[in-house]
Amino acid sequence: MEIHLPVQLEKATEMLMQELPKRSQNVLERRFGLKGGKRATLDAIGKTYSITRERVRQIENDCFNKLRKSEAYKKMGQVFQIITTSIQQKGGVVAESTLVRYLSVSAPHENHAHFLLALAHPFKRATENEQFYHRWYLEDQARSGVEQALATTAKEIRVANRVFQKDEVLAMLARNAAHLPTDARTTDALEAYLALSKEIGSNNFGEWGPSDSALIRPRGMRDMAYLVLKREGKPLHFLKTAELIGTQITKRPVHAQTVHNELIKDSRFVLVGRGTYGLKEWGYEPGIVRDVIARVLKGAALTKEEIMQRVLETRQVKENTVVINLQNKNYFKKLPDGRYTSIV
């Protein structure tokens, strides 16, 4: 949703700056990067004018107070009202990145958007913390209500220990936001709230879950391989795993041997066939075929066919490989009735 203003952002800031003395203009222009540069720190500006950072902050506050009483500010009333309405339509609380994106057609205008938001009285800014990103809002009660709903939703998602579809997350959030006014629980508002949370995220497949989960934001080839296997739901050859990582998850070059090395080193993966790996959580256990047979026969005597069936459920090997291993008399014994037992 792009916010259409009656005046360009640069023109709006230019009109406002004309109300200030030259040095005050320079301080604000550097502080907010209004001339196309990076935003300068209080210390950097203070060194330029040989004043303290506290004095720079005071100048900034004095400038804002003067601008809010100016004729140029009054002429910006329609601009601020449009922004206010847009925030209200998104439930009254909007992530800073989202709001600036709505206001700015292109990156060079972002600093002008930051300046106007900081100047206007209706808008309040909450700085980011461990749970939420920078956000702008209109009323304290609305912000606390939305944050409470998001925190509860994030906790439920983590406890569930699985990924969700977006509509499931929205339904969960709507339930936890039942205490908010009806117009703060629209689909548009709920979707906007999700952008506030650092604890809830989505992956390339449109699945949602804890933002620090390997299934949502994989870090490195191991996590990417885990996500691919989890989605496929079956063992894959490492070449296929590498191919899917490259086509579905990352734009970076993916080297098959690197993926193979990571599969070998990570205990989440189990070799189940020649170059083929499955997930340990699926019931696969590490070890060679002989180890698998020993586990199958633990505390039991089984026929060759029964052993074959159980081994092939966890290993992609030829039947003859199982037969050869059963003939190892150091580990297995064939009973008179034809069944086999483990002797280790």
Image (cartoon, grey):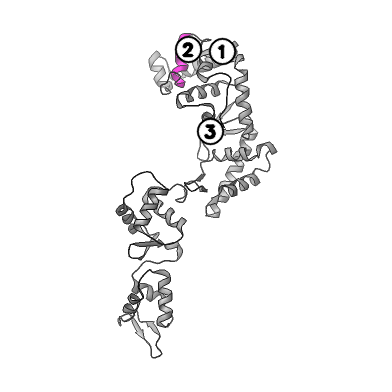
Q: Which residue is mark 3?
A: 98
Callout 2 touching callout 1 (CB < 8 Å): yes
x and y percent of residue 138 in the render?
62, 29
Is label 1 in a helix, a strand or a loop?
A: helix
Find out whether residue 29 is within the magenta segment: yes
Q: Earlier in the sequence, mark 3 or mark 2?
A: 2
The magenta span reads 21-37
User: On screen, 161 above or below 299?
Assistant: above
Is label 2 in a helix, a strand or a loop?
A: helix
Residue 313: quadrant of the picture: bottom left
Q: Residue at x 51, y 35 (%)?
A: 128
Mark 3 vs mark 1, CA separation in Å: 29 Å
x and y percent of residue 215 in the render?
46, 51
Q: Amino acid at mark 2?
A: Ser
Q: Which residue is mark 2?
A: 24
Residue 193: quadrant of the picture: top right
Q: Which residue is mark 1?
A: 66
Quarter of the image where the N terminus is located: top right
